[in-house]
Image: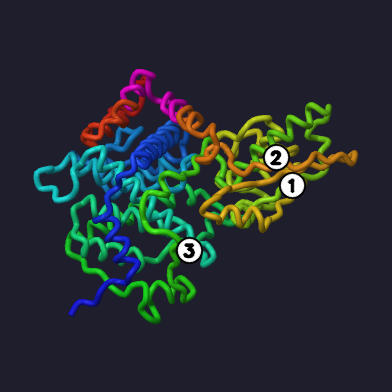
């Protein structure tokens, strides 16, 4: 007799295969999320020489005639390597919302399926509507698991949930049975999982820029292995002593605060500036305080101390002292991004973090960093964890050498948050700005029209982002 799969695996699969998304707002939000992730990929392909080194077939010269056409590149790859490459492009500059990482798995598999033999496809129709549905469900799976399950407290990086959501959704897209999908999910929990070490303190390294691509690649690979006949382990979570709960989760079971639906995609925090999400509010507050300083006839040089009241999550992830070794280290440092904003008078940009940037070498910025104090606040943390409020706030107070104190500026819903009225326009502006790095306004208009066409083949949509040559004028 076959043992039943652990309940969390069953409930996830039931949602994936049997829950119909009917909320029009969810699909509107999914279109925004889709375009934002694609825009981030184009930005990386255009700007990052580091990321470009990851791209292309594993063995030079390998040709995959029906492969995934990686947006922003001339490459056509198998869906496993394609998921990695596209995941790198989406994430490397840290300008995308965390959940958008899943698009790398979804788009690589669906585009590849479109270009192979569609007549044998057993899964859902390979249309834009299916793509958006897959994105909504991937966001929801990752989002619901992240709400009440602190993987980081066990030293596990959040991309474990990218692997989970992507593997599940890819199983559905491939046309696997529900039993096969559960087997795929069980293989996710069987895996070893990446440590958070590469995002932590002095150990922050560029791996954080390709970790999501790695998770997407593994998700696709696991689903394909199950499609080829690999079986799953039903008690992968609960088995003693080697199940996931005992081995990796402190003996606890997963907790869930809401049912799977479409909440997550409707509550995305978009990054309209390339700053770790928990630091965006502090950057906004810093710019307000800079304006006050100038109005009073002071300069940043008059600042003795900057106090930032923020969430425990921000304190854990981006409160850093000491030397910063690379761009990945700098964009995950609260003191660096706040000091940069104060000195620059504008939001950080991707180039500001690079080793060759004047800011990376700035003694003035280094001195200012030492005067920034980050304090976790119980109230802001509670509001951050409150699913009804879901703020991501920081308060910033400035003390001057002459004894003057600029009262705290509190930003609870920074630009990019669904409750900030400026978010929609800012996200659209970001998309157009990124796309103009590679495409003409006329071509961008074609893309904006295509994303509204639910019946369009996914491969036809992907063609709009592919480059047939290594370089050249904008399309």
Which residue is located at x 54 percent, y 32 percent? 422
| Residue identified by numbered label 3 | 149
CA gap, disc 1 to disc 3? 31 Å
Q: Mark 1 or mark 3, which is nearer to you?
A: 3
Please, is residue 410 above or below residue 228 in the view? Answer: above
The answer to whether any part of residue 58 appears in the image is: no
Q: Is residue 378 left or right of residue 209?
A: right
Q: Determine the residue located farthest toward the left in the rendered image.
A: 119
Q: How many other residues sit within 10 Å of disc 3, few (<14), some (14-19) or many (≥20)?
A: some
Quadrant of res 336: top right
- Provide residue 74's location: percent of width, then percent of height: 30, 33
Quadrant location, the C terminus:
top left
Choose the circle earlier in sequence order: 2 or 1.
Answer: 2
- Magenta residues span 431-447
| Residue identified by numbered label 1 | 372
| Residue identified by numbered label 2 | 339
Q: Is residue 374 left or right of residue 441?
A: right
Residue in front for this viewpoint, 13 or 327:
13
Cβ atoms under marks 2 and 1 closer than 8 Å? yes
Which residue is located at x 27 percent, y 60 percent? 14
Q: Is residue 381 left or right of residue 457?
A: right
Magenta: main secondary structure equals helix
- Provide residue 463's location: percent of width, then percent of height: 26, 31
């Amino acid at each position: 007799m076959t043992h039943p799969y652990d309940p969390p695996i069953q409930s996830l699969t039931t949602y994936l295969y049997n829950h119909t998304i009917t909320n029009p707002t969810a699909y509107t939000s999914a279109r925004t999320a889709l375009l934002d992730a694609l825009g981030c990929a184009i930005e990386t392909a255009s700007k990052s020489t580091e990321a470009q080194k990851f791209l292309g077939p594993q063995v030079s010269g390998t040709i995959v005639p029906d492969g995934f056409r990686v947006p922003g590149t001339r490459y056509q790859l198998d869906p496993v390597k394609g998921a990695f490459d596209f995941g790198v492009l989406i994430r490397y500059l840290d300008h995308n919302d965390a959940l958008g990482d899943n698009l790398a798995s979804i788009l690589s598999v669906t585009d590849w399926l479109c270009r192979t033999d569609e007549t044998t496809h057993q899964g859902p129709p390979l249309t834009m509507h299916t793509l958006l549905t897959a994105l909504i469900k991937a966001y929801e799976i990752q989002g619901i698991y992240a709400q009440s399950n602190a993987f980081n407290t066990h030293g596990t990086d959040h991309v474990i949930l990218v692997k989970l959501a992507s593997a599940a959704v890819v199983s559905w897209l491939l046309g696997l049975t529900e039993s096969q999908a559960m087997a795929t999910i069980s293989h996710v929990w069987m895996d070893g999982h990446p440590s958070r070490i590469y995002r932590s303190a002095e150990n922050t390294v560029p791996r954080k820029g390709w970790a999501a691509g790695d998770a997407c690649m593994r998700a696709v690979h696991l689903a394909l292995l199950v499609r080829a006949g690999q079986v799953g382990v039903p008690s992968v979570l609960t088995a003693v002593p080697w199940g996931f709960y005992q081995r990796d989760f402190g003996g606890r079971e997963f907790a869930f605060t809401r049912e799977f639906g479409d909440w997550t995609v409707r509550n995305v925090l978009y990054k309209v500036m390339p700053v770790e999400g928990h630091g965006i509010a502090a950057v906004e507050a810093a710019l307000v305080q800079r304006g006050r300083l100038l109005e009073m006839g002071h300069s940043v040089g008059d600042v003795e101390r900057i106090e930032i009241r923020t969430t425990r999550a921000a304190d854990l992830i981006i409160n850093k002292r000491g030397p910063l070794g690379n761009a990945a280290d700098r964009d995950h440092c609260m003191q660096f991004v706040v000091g940069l904003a104060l000195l620059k008078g504008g939001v950080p940009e991707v180039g500001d973090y690079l080793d060759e940037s004047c800011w990376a070498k700035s003694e003035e910025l280094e001195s200012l960093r030492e005067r920034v104090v980050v304090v976790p606040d119980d109230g802001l943390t509670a509001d951050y964890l409150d699913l009804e409020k879901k703020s991501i706030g920081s308060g910033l107070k400035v003390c001057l050498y002459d004894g003057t104190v600029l009262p705290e500026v509190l930003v609870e819903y920074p630009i990019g948050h669904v409750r900030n009225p400026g978010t929609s326009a800012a996200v659209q502006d970001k998309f157009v700005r990124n796309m103009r790095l590679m495409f003409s306004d006329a071509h961008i208009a074609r893309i904006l029209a295509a994303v509204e066409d639910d019946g369009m083949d996914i491969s036809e949509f992907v063609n709009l982002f592919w480059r047939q040559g290594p370089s050249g004028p904008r399309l």
